[in-house]
Image: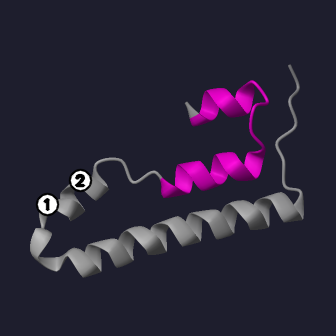
């Protein structure tokens, strides 16, 4: 979905990078299976989110883009 939105020019490249960085797939499911360490789990999810947002903002600010040739 993220790639489709990027290819149809619905989102910028930085947003695409941030979305792909934050997507942990089944990793969060495995992480959340351990309910005894819920504080650590929330910290890991928050850290993943903050890193992804930061990377996406940096990519947008630097103007990194992939030109479309087709």
Q: What x and y, as percent, mark residue 57?
A: 75, 64
Residue 15 colored magenta? yes
Q: How is the image coloured?
A: one colour
Q: Is residue 38 left or right of residue 66?
A: left
Q: Position of residue 45 (x, y in %)?
A: 39, 68
Q: Residues within 10 Å of mark 2 (few under 14, many from 20)?
A: few
Q: Nearer the viewer, residue 35 or 59?
A: 35
Looking at the image, residue 19 lies above or below residue 61:
above
| Position of the C terminus by quadrant | top right
Task: Using the numbered discs, state the Cα–Cα distance from disc 2 to disc 1 in whole angstroms.
Answer: 6 Å
Quarter holding residue 54 = bottom right
Please, which residue is most extreme toward the top here? 70
Disc 1: which residue: 33
Q: Main secondary structure of the magenta part?
A: helix
Which residue is painted at 26% across and 80% down in the image?
A: 39
Residue at screen point 87% across, 64% down: 62
Magenta part of the protein: which range? 2-22
Q: Secondary structure at mark 1?
A: helix
Instruction: Locate residue 22 relative to residue 63 in the image: left or right.
Output: left
Residue nearer the viewer, 67 or 33: 33
Image quarter for residue 8? Answer: top right
Residue 2 disc label: none
Quadrant in the picture for residue 66:
top right
Q: Are marks 2 and 1 in contact (CB under 8 Å)?
A: yes
Image quarter (top left, top right, bottom left or bottom right) of the N terminus: top right
Q: Secondary structure at mark 2?
A: helix
| Residue that label 2 marks | 29
**Magenta run includes residue 27:** no
Mark 1 neighbour class, 10 Å CA radius: few under 14, some 14 to 19, many 20 or more: few
Percent coordinates x, y for residue 35 in the rendering: 12, 69
């Amino acid at each position: 979905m993220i790639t489709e939105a990027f290819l149809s020019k619905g989102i910028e490249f930085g947003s695409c990078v941030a979305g792909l960085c934050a997507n942990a797939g089944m990793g969060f499911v495995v992480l959340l299976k351990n309910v005894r360490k819920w504080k650590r789990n929330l910290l890991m999810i928050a850290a993943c989110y903050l890193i992804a947002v930061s990377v996406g903002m940096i990519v947008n600010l630097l103007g990194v883009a992939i030109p479309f040739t087709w």
